[in-house]
Image (cartoon, grey):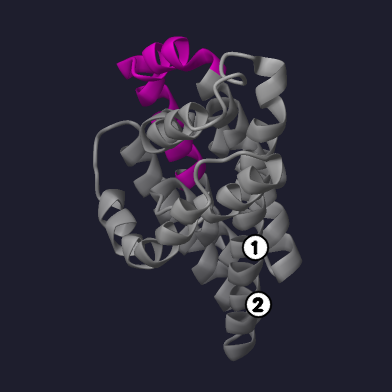
Amino acid sequence: MTLGSAALVGLLGGVHCMGMCGGIVGALTLGLPEQLRGQPVAMAPYVAAYNLGRILSYATAGALMGGLGRFAAHLVAVNQAQQGLRLLAGVFMLMLGLYLGGWWAGLARLERAGGVLWRRIEPLGRRLLPVRTPQQALLVGLLWGWLPCGLVYTALTWSLSAGSAGQGALLMLGFGLGTLPAVAGMGAFAVAMTGLLRRPWVRGGAGVLVLAFGAYTVALALLG
């Protein structure tokens, strides 16, 4: 999995971001001072801070998973570890493709499991609301990055096979940048984007492309 393909999967995952994060973006936008709402230039520092915090959290989680994968590789033969982790990443990607296409909702169970951690983090974010400064927005974004999300969890399995903490962080950075168009565009283009991303052919197309990535990754793992 390269940075470019991670960013592409993040971009294709916009069909999921709209449903998962649309309500959060709306709530954060409405919570800004009234004079800023509807003013794209004035809102830009807040939107940038939210997303910077979110992507930094992704990169931190990627570093943790990359380090864990590197540690696992020392416990068994490196080639076997890499092959096993790559196979795991490919299987998760196949699951994600089915999830994005609306054909299977199994990843929703993983999101519910992640809710155990989120229930401890979410109260911290509530104390930062309403957001009045970009610094507050950055802190909210850092917490937002730990929201239970099957799309993010799938990307984190790729970080396991990245080879190091640094590579895992870079992989999740690429993924996070790929999600930017959907998440950052929700505030300004919410109506148009919602209509587009809810069309079955858009969801289906994204699902098929991610399935292709997953099949390719699984094939590489099985062929060594």
Residue tagged by mark 2?
Answer: 70
CA gap, disc 1 to disc 2? 15 Å
Decide: few, some or many residues near mark 2? Use Cα within 10 Å; few <14, some 14-19, many ≥20: many
The extreme right residue here reads 166
Q: Position of residue 63 (x, y in %)?
A: 66, 66
Give the label on residue 101, or none: none
In the image, residue 12 lies in the stretch drawn in magenta: no
Tell me: 186 left or right of 194. right
- The percent coordinates of residue 78 (x first, y second) are 64, 79
Which one is in front, 204 or 193?
Answer: 193
Residue 15 at what x, y percent from top left?
A: 42, 28
Residue 137 coordinates in the image, percent (x, y) = 62, 43
The residue stretch that appears in magenta: 188-214
In which quarter of the view is residue 166 placed?
bottom right
Numbered tag placed on residue 60 in the rendering = 1
| Res 99 seen here | yes
Q: Nearer the viewer, mark 1 or mark 2?
A: 1
Q: Residue at x 59, y 74 (%)?
A: 69
Residue drawn at x 72%, y 32% is 45
